[in-house]
Image (cartoon, grey):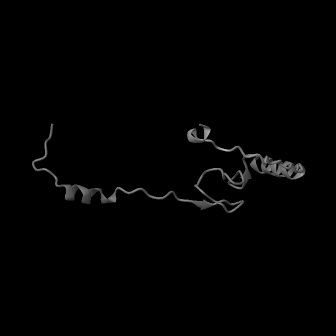
Amino acid sequence: MAVPFRKISKTRGRMRRTHYKIEANSTVKCSNCGAAIRPHRVCPECGFYKGKNVTEKVAKEEKVVETKKATPKKETKKVEKTTKAKKTTKKESK
């Protein structure tokens, strides 16, 4: 097994590793909605890939929005109890 002739110092080893960096993921604009997405992937916002609708995400979102608007909200009044229980300590109970 090969053994180095001299120990590599901490500084020299760290200087060598300065180029080992994490780079940010590249993004492109979706051709349909303009959202920033990773290249060569289906757009999570609209479901389009290369100008074609791949998933039915748009239709599902519209149905959800319509059903939420169609159902009226029930107004319920909460009745608050005004009775307050008095806290008793050991000294007061004697």
Residue at 77 percent across and 51 percent down: it is 58
Q: Nearer the viewer, residue 77 or 25?
A: 77
Please state the total of marks drawn on the protein image: 0
Residue 22, how many percent across, how many down?
A: 41, 56
Farthest residue to the left: give it. Answer: 5
30 horizontally vs 91: left or right: right
Question: Considering only vertical position in the picture, is 91 above or below 11?
Answer: above
Residue at 14 percent across and 40 percent down: it is 2
> Picture quarter containing residue 32?
bottom right
> Picture quarter containing residue 15?
bottom left
Q: Nearer the viewer, residue 69 or 53?
A: 69
> Picture quarter containing residue 14?
bottom left
Residue at 71 percent across and 56 percent down: it is 51
Residue 40, how many percent across, how many down?
A: 60, 52
Q: Nearer the viewer, residue 22 or 82?
A: 82
73 horizontally vs 58: left or right: right
Residue 11, how many percent across, how many down?
A: 20, 59
**In the rendered image, which quarter contains the N terminus?**
top left
